[in-house]
Amino acid sequence: MQEAQRSYPERGFETAPTNYHASDDISSESKKSDPELNMPLDKTATVQEGSERFNRLGWKRLTICLIVEAIALGSLSIPSAFAKLGMVAGVIMCLGLGLIAIYTSYVVGQVKMRYPHVNHYSDAVQLIWGRFGYELVGVMFALFLILLVGSHALTGTIAFINIIGNYQICALAWSVVSLIILLLLALPPSFAEFAILGYIDFVSIIVAIMVTIIATGVQAHNAPGGLAAVPWSAMPPPGTTFYEAFLATTNIIFAYSFAVCQFSFMSEMHTPTDYVKSIWALGLIEIFIYTITGALIYAFVGVDVKSPALLSAGDTVSRIAFGIALPVIFISGSINGTVVGRYIMDRAFPNSPIRYVKGLRGWAVWICLITIITIVGWIIAEAIPFFNALLGLISSLFISGFTFYFPALFWFQLVREGGCFSSTKNIMLSLLNGGVFIMGIVILGAGTYASVEDIIHQYTSGNVRSAFTCSAISYT
C-alpha cells in the first residue's frame, strides 16, 4: 500500500523529503519538548531516581499532609468566633463552610486530573489568566505561606512563654528557638517523608483539644451555678459590630483553607485519582473537630473565652495544653516552608537533579533555601508589631481566591463540559459555582475591611507590641 503523502511547508517541502523517516521527526520533536532526553545518560538516570522519590504519596498520607497544613492551633480560636457569632450561627458556619471547602477542593483536584503538568496553584491560574496570573498567584502563594511560617514562630514564642512562666527571660530567646525548630522540621523535602511527622501533629492537636474541652468543662461544672450559669447565647451578643462578626467569620473561613497546597501535594501522589478520598476524609474530620470544639468550649466558658481557647483552661492546665500542642505548632508551621521550598525548586531547577534534592549540591541548595524562607518569615513576624492582624488582612486578600473564587473560575473555564444551561446538572453546578465566586468576592471585600478595622482597633487600644521586643509580658 502506498504511504500517504505528508506536507511540510514549514521546512520547504510539499511532501516528505528524501530519506525522511517519521521516527527522526518524532525523536527530534520529543527532544525539544523533553529536555531530559538531551541530558547525558547518567544525569537522566539521576533525575529519574529523584522523580520516583517524589512520587510515593498515597491518599492516606495526602490526608495527613492536608491535616497538617489545615488543622493547627487556630482550631482553638473557633470558640472565640462562636462567642461573637452565637451558637447557632457558629455551628451553621462550621458545617456550611466545611461542605463548600470540600467541594472547591474537589474542583481543584479535577483541574489537576485534567492538567497533570500543574504542580502548584500558580500553574493552574496560568491556564485561565496566562503569564500575568502565573506570576501574580506565585507571589501570593509564596508570600502567604512564608507569613504562615512567621505566624507559627510567634505562636511558638507565646507557647514557650506560657509553659515556662518566667517573664524575665527575653522573648527573643524563645523566638530564636522557635525559628530553629521550624527550620529543622521543614528539611524533609518530600511530602511522603513529611507525612510521618504529620501523625505526631494530628495526635498533638487532638489531645490538646481534648485536654482543653475537659478542663473547661470541669471548671464550668465546679463554678457557682454550674453549667447553667455559663453566659453563652444562641444569637450574637448585643452590641456586636459588623467588623467583629465578620472577623470572627473569617477565623472559620481560614480554618478551611486546605486547597492552597493541594496542587503541590497531589503532584507527589502515585495514584492521583485517590485524592477524593483524602478531601472527604479531611473535610469531615475538620467539620467534626471545629464544630465540637467551638460549641463545647463556648458552652463551657461563655462570651469571655480566650483565643486560643486553651488560655481559658486555667494556668496549670493551659501550660500542659501548650506543651502538648508544641508538635502541632511547629510541624504545621514548617510544612508551609517545605511547600514554598518545593515551589521555588520546581521553578528554579526544572530539569536538574537539584530539583529533587539529589546529591550534595541538591541538599546544599535545599538547606540554604529552607533557611532563607524560615528566617524571612521570622523577621517579618518580629518586625511588624501588628503581625497577626496583618496576617488576617493577607488571608482575606488571598484565601478568598485560593478557596473560593479561583476554584469557581476553574470550573467555568477548565472543568465544565458543555454550556452552562445545556443540562440540569450544568445549570445546578453553574448556580453553585456562581454562588461560590460571589462568596469569594464578598470575603475579599468584607474580610479586608474587617482586618483593617482590627489593625486600627489594636493600635487605638494599645495592644500592639514593639518590634523585636524582649518583653515577654507583651506576648500574653
Image (cartoon, grey):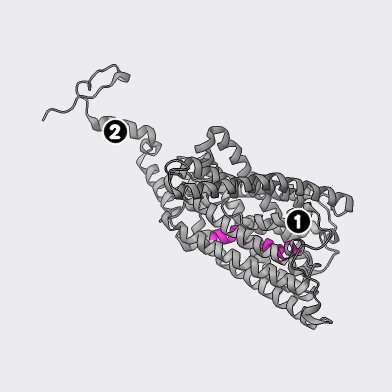
Q: Is the magenta stretch mostly helix, strand or loop?
A: helix
Quadrant that contains the C terminus: bottom right
Q: Assess whether residue 181 is covered by the magenta stretch.
A: no
Is label 2 in a helix, a strand or a loop?
Answer: helix
Q: Which amino acid does label 2 sit on?
A: Ile
Residue 269 versus residue 320 in the image, above or below: above
Q: Which residue is drawn at 83% across and 67% down?
A: 166
Counting other residues with Cα less than 10 Å from the Cα at mark 1, is it few (<14), some (14-19), or many (20 or more)?
Answer: some
User: In the structure shown, which secondary structural element does the residue marked by tag 1 occupy?
Assistant: helix
Residue type at mark 1 is Ala
Left or right: 92, with 264 as reference point = right
In the picture of the structure, the residue carrying the numbered disc 1 is 245
The residue tagged 2 is: 26
The residue at the point 45 percent across, 44 percent down is 416
Q: What stretch is highlighted in magenta?
A: 65-81
Residue occupying the point 74% across, 68% down: 234
